[in-house]
Amino acid sequence: NAGVMQNPRHLVRRRGQEARLRCSPMKGHSHVYWYRQLPEEGLKFMVYLQKENIIDESGMPKERFSAEFPKEGPSILRIQQVVRGDSAAYFCASSPSWVAGNEQFFGPGTRLTVL
Amino acid sequence: GQQVMQIPQYQHVQEGEDFTTYCNSSTTLSNIQWYKQRPGGHPVFLIQLVKSGEVKKQKRLTFQFGEAKKNSSLHITATQTTDVGTYFCAGHNQGGKLIFGQGTELSVKP
């Protein structure tokens, strides 16, 4: 049973380019969460999605960031016109349902570096 | 908004010494989860506490949930080099969002 998969594992972009981060949840999991981790900091919630629905995007910056979880395929976190401050590790997690108390299974993360 | 604070931020211990990290929430939590992240790795779920005053053990790790369900602690007895990493507590808010503490980074000197 494959775990949460994220790709790419490392991504380098120049300022102004777009970054696309992909996340495939564990089999049977319909809930996906994206977190950002800056160096030596904790995990900051960004967005919570179910298939074809954004449930909670209160942690997403208002501009340049968007997320989707289509009916088919992985969840995508998209960052337009990246800036140096976007450099961070982006983790995706999944759970089988919304129920508070469900363990979240984390993917290996995508480490984004903006030059 | 709800905040989850964790102290200390860093802890350096000699192998064999004990280690404790503390977690405090600004609001009552429905449950608290603990995760461990090895250097360069991703968070891995350790345990969940739900009941007021609950204590759970995993080998050398002891987890406690406060009576008021606003604080928690993780205690490691006789640390080993394999314990190295950052330990995060996380609590669910009313909307089901998981709020993470800043983490305590543990280093163990052999």
Image (cartoon, coloured by chain):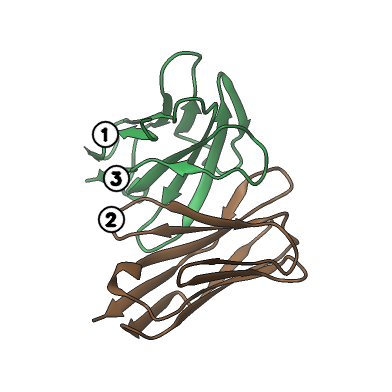
Chain colours: A green, B brown
User: Residues at badges 2 and 3 in contact (C-beta under 8 Å)?
Assistant: no
The label on residue B16 is none
Q: CA distance from mark 3 to mark 1?
A: 8 Å
Query: Dot 3 falls on which chain?
Result: A
Q: Which residue is mark 2?
A: B40
Q: What secondary structure is marked by label 2?
A: loop
Q: Which residue is mark 3?
A: A111
Q: Which residue is mark 1?
A: A8
Where's residue B20, x and y in %?
Answer: 50, 78
Asked whether the viewer can see residue B60, the reply is yes
The residue drawn where x is 30% and y is 35% is A16
- Mark 3 vs mark 1: same chain? yes
Q: Earlier in the sequence, mark 3 or mark 1?
A: 1
Instruction: Locate the N terminus of chain B by quadrant.
Output: bottom right
The residue drawn where x is 26% and y is 46% is A113
The answer to which quarter of the image holds residue B19 is bottom left
Three-letter code for the amino acid on which mark 1 is drawn: Pro
Where's residue B24, x and y in %?
Answer: 64, 70
Question: Vertically, is B28 above or below A63?
Answer: below
Give whichever of B28, A66 is nearer the camera.
B28
- Mark 1 vs mark 2: same chain? no
Q: CA distance from mark 2 to mark 3?
A: 10 Å
